Amino acid sequence: MTDVMDRIDEHVKNNPVIIFMKGTPQLPQCGFSSRAADMLKSCGKEFAYFNVIADMEVFQNLPRYADWPTFPQLYVNGELIGGHDIMLEMYEKGELQKLVEEAAQ
């Protein structure tokens, strides 16, 4: 399990903004992942993504990485921001856009 946790950690630490999601931003595999990716795309900055469906080890272990049970999971500057609901709340307040903008600099 350490190997997969190290891989997750590497993705989180090496990408200022990364979303672990079901599918890809271009071809999401669930509604929550689709809406979360759309919110990030509308921020107008680059972000990384990881398709958890393509790697069952990550799919099974990511909930333990930051003690967050669901997908998608958004990390900014190495910190878990949360899932779809938190992203939506932040987006509606303009906080997500600001966070992504600052991380992209």
Image: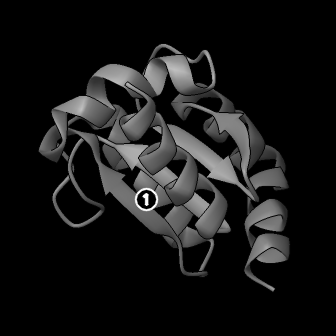
Write down the residue under mark 1. 38
Name the residue: 68% across, 68% down.
16
Is residue 29 positioned above or below 98 on the image? Answer: above
Q: Is mark 1 on a helix, strand or loop?
A: helix
The residue sitting at the bottom extreme is 105
The quadrant where residue 65 appears: top right
- The number of callouts visible is 1
Query: x and y percent of residue 14 in the render?
Result: 60, 68
Query: x and y percent of residue 76 in the render?
Result: 71, 55
Q: Nearer the viewer, residue 28 or 70?
A: 70
Quadrant into which the N terminus falls: top left
Amino acid type for the residue under numbered disc 1:
Asp
Name the residue: 76% across, 42% down.
90
Give left or right: position of 2 versus 58.
right
Name the residue: 65% across, 59% down.
13
Is residue 9 positioned above or below 41 on the image? Answer: above
Q: Which colour scheme is used?
A: one colour
Name the residue: 53% across, 71% down.
47
Query: x and y percent of residue 30 in the render?
Result: 22, 35
Query: x and y percent of residue 26 in the render?
Result: 22, 67
The residue sitting at the front extreme is 2
Quadrant into which the C terminus falls: bottom right
The quadrant where residue 61 appears: top left
